[in-house]
Amino acid sequence: MNHTAYIKLIEELSLNAWPSHKIELYDGWLIRFSHNYSHRTNSVEQVGVSLLPVQEKIVYCEQIYKNYHTPSIFKISPLLESSFDHLLASAGYEIQHTTEVMTMDYSQLRAWPPSSAEYGHPGENCAPASFITFPGDITVQLQDQITDEWISSFFSLNGTTNSIHRRIVPSMFKAIPKQTIVASIRMDGRMVASGLGILDRSHVGLYAIYVDACFRRKNFAKAICSSILHEARKKGMTHAYLQVVQGNIPAKQLYHALGFHDLYTYWFRVK
């Protein structure tokens, strides 16, 4: 698969992995809306051939977001002609949230080997939980379903307090159409680290990697990512991908150490 085709694949996997609250298909463009929860789920993404004049389409999208009372945002990836980015810049759109996409072939995997593992057994009403332990007595709990309790703990972990977001985002998590690996580390009864693996077409995407500020530099993120990667390989995945905001040096260092390499960069134009 050539470079451009692989970028297109990763872009498709990312769309599947993180649904928006509302989506409108407009002449090959997806107009995504999620009450401004994140740029990715609240922006225009080009996925197909366009037939209408581009200026007309931009005006249409701006009106849609105006009606939603949120900023007008366009995602810019290497799949687009550079002229579109220049057009938005000339119209007063500024660059925000530049993001680096990293990928890994499992032949390059350098995940942290666990010291022990305890695999759960199916119960009557829920899927089993597994417990993966790493050196330093770090235990990661893995489940295959995104539960209300995990989402609530995730909100506490990443500081989501907006009442609208707390109402709509759980449905976005539960709308993910792919198999998931849900990871957490708990200390004194509360989740202090989280992670989400989403499986699609031989790839696992790493999402929702958060560590409580009080527990950073303790290898928790390394344990979360390694657990998801190990479990995904057991489920037949052969590649992995993730997205990291440009400038997050500690995260990039971890991902490089795990075996990931840079593939491409995208950003958002915001008016």
Image: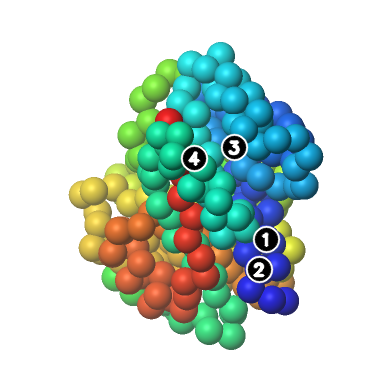
Q: Specify the quadrant of the image occupied by residue 29.
A: top right
Mark 2 is on which residue type?
Answer: Thr
On the rendered image, what quadrant is the C terminus found in?
top left
Q: Nearer the viewer, residue 112 or 76?
A: 76
Element type where label 1 sits in the image: helix
As drawn, the label of residue 88 is 4
Residue on which the image places disc 2: 4
| Tag of residue 44 | 3
Q: Nearer the viewer, mark 1 or mark 4?
A: 4
Name the residue at 66% across, 45% down.
46
* Residue 63, image x, y percentages: 58, 19
Marks 2 and 1: CB-CB under 8 Å?
A: yes
From the image, tell me which residue sits under label 1. Answer: 8
SS class, disc 2: helix
Of the residues shown, which amino acid type is indicated by label 4? Leu
Residue 81 drawn above or below residue 239: above
What residue is drawn where x is 41% and y is 70%? 255
